[in-house]
Image (cartoon, helix red, strand yellow):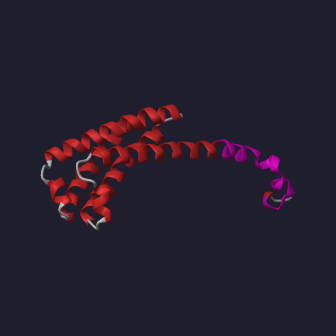
Amino acid sequence: MIPDFLNPEFLIPEALRPEFQAFGTGFPVTLLHAGVTLLMLMIGTAVYAFLTPYKEINQIRDGNSAAAVGFGGVIISLAIPLATSMSASTSIREIVIWGGATILLQLFVFRIVDFLLSGLPERINDGEVSAAVLLVAAKLAGAIILAAAVAG
């Protein structure tokens, strides 16, 4: 009796067929789901940048570290519920529906946080990193709660 690891039959593609089939079927779907979710993240980030009165991208280009911290927090805060939406979904349609809903809810949460912590966006505009860190923490907290709600 030859051990399995020395058996040349192990090298025949037929013996590995189920694993290759699973990978061949699953990997393109994984790439598609990730691509759709990344596209939605870019759209959500662009919508946020368009809706905010302060143009963070221009401020970042001008060297405003607080704006960079704040905008980085926005990207992460959008990504967390989007990632949960993707993992909870079984189709592209579901990813788009749940992802779109989480983007809208998260943009609403951002507005609430900006309202409750009034004055912080202006301080970020003035370059105060401490204000940006607090605002990002509040937005991340909202993102984590929203992600947990989506995960059910």
Q: Is residue 104 above or below residue 126?
A: above
Q: Nearer the viewer, residue 111 or 21?
A: 111
Q: Which residues are magenta?
A: 5-25
On the question of residue 3 being in view, the answer is yes
Q: Position of residue 111 (x, y in %)?
A: 22, 42
> Relative to 19, is 58 on the left or the right?
left
Q: Nearer the viewer, residue 23 or 60?
A: 60
Q: Quadrant of residue 85?
A: top left
Farthest-out residue, bottom: 63
The residue drawn where x is 37% and y is 47% is: 46
In which quadrant of the rendered image does the N terminus lie?
A: bottom right
On the question of residue 144 being in view, the answer is no
The residue drawn where x is 35% and y is 42% is: 147
In which quadrant of the rendered image does the C terminus lie?
A: top left
The mark tally for this picture is: 0
Q: Position of residue 140 (x, y in %)?
A: 29, 51
Q: Nearer the viewer, residue 135 or 6?
A: 135
- Is 58 contained in the magenta span? no
Q: Quadrant of residue 135?
A: bottom left
Q: Is residue 65 above or below residue 84?
A: below
Q: Position of residue 113 (x, y in %)?
A: 20, 46
The residue drawn where x is 42% and y is 38% is: 99
> Relative to 65, is 27 on the left or the right?
right
Q: Position of residue 58 (x, y in %)?
A: 30, 59
Q: Is residue 60 above or below residue 75?
A: below
- Is 9 contained in the magenta span? yes
Magenta region, main secondary structure? helix
The residue drawn where x is 30% and y is 41% is: 106
Q: Is residue 54 above or below residue 147?
A: below
